[in-house]
Amino acid sequence: MARNKFDIDEELEARFDAKQLRRLLGYLKPYRGKVAFTILLMIVSSMLALLGPYLVKVSIDEMIPSGNIPGLIVLASIFLVTLVFNTICMKYRIRTMSYIGQNIIYNIREDIFRHIQKLPFAYYDSRPHGKILVRVVNYVNSLSDLLSNGLINLITDLFTLAAIVVFLLILNVRLALICFIGLPVLITVTLLIKNAQRKAWQKVSRKLSNMNAYIHESISGIKVTQSFAREDENMDIFLEQNEEYRKSWMDAIRVQFLMWPIIDIISVISVCAIYFAGIHWLGTGGITTGIIIAFTSYVWRFWEPVINLGNFYNSIINAVAYLERIFETIDEKPTVADLPGAVTMPSINGAVEFRDVLFCYEKDEVVLDHVSFHVEPGQTIALVGPTGAGKSTIVNLVSRFYDVQEGRVMIDGRDVRSVTLESLRKQMGIMLQDTFIFSGTIMDNIKYSRLDASDEDAIAAAKAVMAHDFIEAMPEGYQTEVNERGSRLSVGQRQLISFARALLADPRILVLDEATSSIDTETEIALQAGLQRLLKGRTSFVIAHRLSTIKNADKILYIDDGKIIEQGTHEELMAKGGAYCKLYTAQYRLLEVV
């Protein structure tokens, strides 16, 4: 659990390689027709644009000396047509590649979100949620420019560069060789700084993740922050995280922009060398004024795609730092998943058995120590004991939110690992200790467990758990909009809505984890009558610290230190005078004092 903290840098477990680059390019497959046509169009456009300097050379060396006005008009018309065609192609490219790029972003985000829905509780327990959120939103967004423009520009610039080399060699080989002298220097510099660039952008991604995690944590805990007047301390922590991100970004930019001035310097030196050599050789070896002017124009254009390629290289290095994290998340193996050969769970009768179950959240930290018990269909089982004894872990294993390290959890004689998760959980109603209300209407929240339920069914569930009256008293009744996490509702109201949601699922196995902990005593007494009717005929696991609420359970399991210390009915355990009796008596005396 050490990495479940906002200021712990995440170690990268899967480095980016050529295989992952091919994987990224795989997202282009559905659009390969549009991409191919766009590339072809841009290559043709670039080739036509390169005619400009050559047309200038012909005009200076041939048309102007001979006074060929019609020839000049033809050349000017050709030059104008190439400019118009190039503009149209550029507009088409921007529109098409923006469409393709955003669709790829959509697909990547869809893949990562679909995958994180399948990841088990353990994955979310081990890292701040802000570090997960930053991968789905920020990191994916960072790929937008690369996918919208970078790949097309790469191919276009490579063809343009090759075409310019051909034009340069056609005009004059000696001058062309002078132009190419700077390339070895550029290649050497690129190789020297590439590792520094990659490490710098990886650090940026880590610091952005840390900052996002702290912002998410701070917003989630804003009520606690303000309750304890921690605003100044939190601001100091945020400024520290913000400064680390700013510093890492500036360090990455310093390394990244080493490329551009080097290319710029080499290009200027190359042009100066061309002018010097061209003037020196003017009139010899076929070098004319028109060739020098055309040649310098091509040289400037030669370094333009080189600069673009350098920028693309920087974009790749930047994007790789984010792609590594994105693919790492998508490749995260669910520790709880359908096993090969898993079958659909038949209609559950409700027999539950734990056979010598050993479970640990962390290695060597035993939570359940070889626990065994059997539950008959339709029985209500109460789990009691001190905090941290393992009560919630038992119901989490029944629902297969985690898998056991040893032993077996059986439902109707089937190991829960032998059936599909969906078919198992669809037959279970679960109200966890941490109630969650989604943004939307109250009706939407109740129907969350069964989308095909009618309004009448949802209202019946709300009435059964004593939620109907307070819902009807709200401004728009069941259509009242509630905020994320139900901030407009009291804790007790949120619990009752969650209770209705669990019961609407009409589960064969019902799990109630501290379901009445925030409900007032009067409502709880009324609720118990409805619960007894609803619990009848279905296997139920009830966790409660108020022992008065589970007196009617068919069996009570007293859990302590990961083991079942006692089990039996309320009367049997009271007569035994053991740990349960002492706990019940202590609660009863406390209530008398109150």
Image: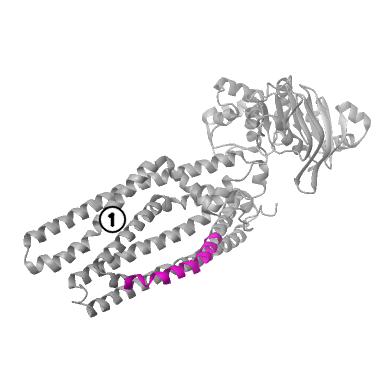
**Residue 191 colored magenta?**
yes
**Residue 488 colored magenta?**
no
Percent of width and height locating residue 474: 55, 31
Q: Quadrant of residue 181?
A: bottom left
As drawn, is 536 to the left or to the right of 370? left
Circle 1: element type: helix
Residue type pointed to by label 1: Ser
Between 132 and 236, the one nearer to me in the picture: 132
In this rendering, is residue 87 above or below 408? below
| Mark 1 crowd level (few <14, some 14–19, many ≥20, 10 Å Cα) | many
In the picture, which quadrant includes the C terminus? top right
The residue at the point 65 percent across, 34 percent down is: 338
The residue at the point 46 percent across, 70 percent down is: 188
> Which residue was labeled with disc 1?
46
Percent of width and height locating residue 123: 65, 45
Which range of residues does the magenta coloring cover?
Answer: 177-202
In this rendering, is residue 558 above or below 364? above
As drawn, is 563 to the left or to the right of 410? right
Farthest residue to the right: give it: 576
As drawn, is 501 to the left or to the right of 102? right
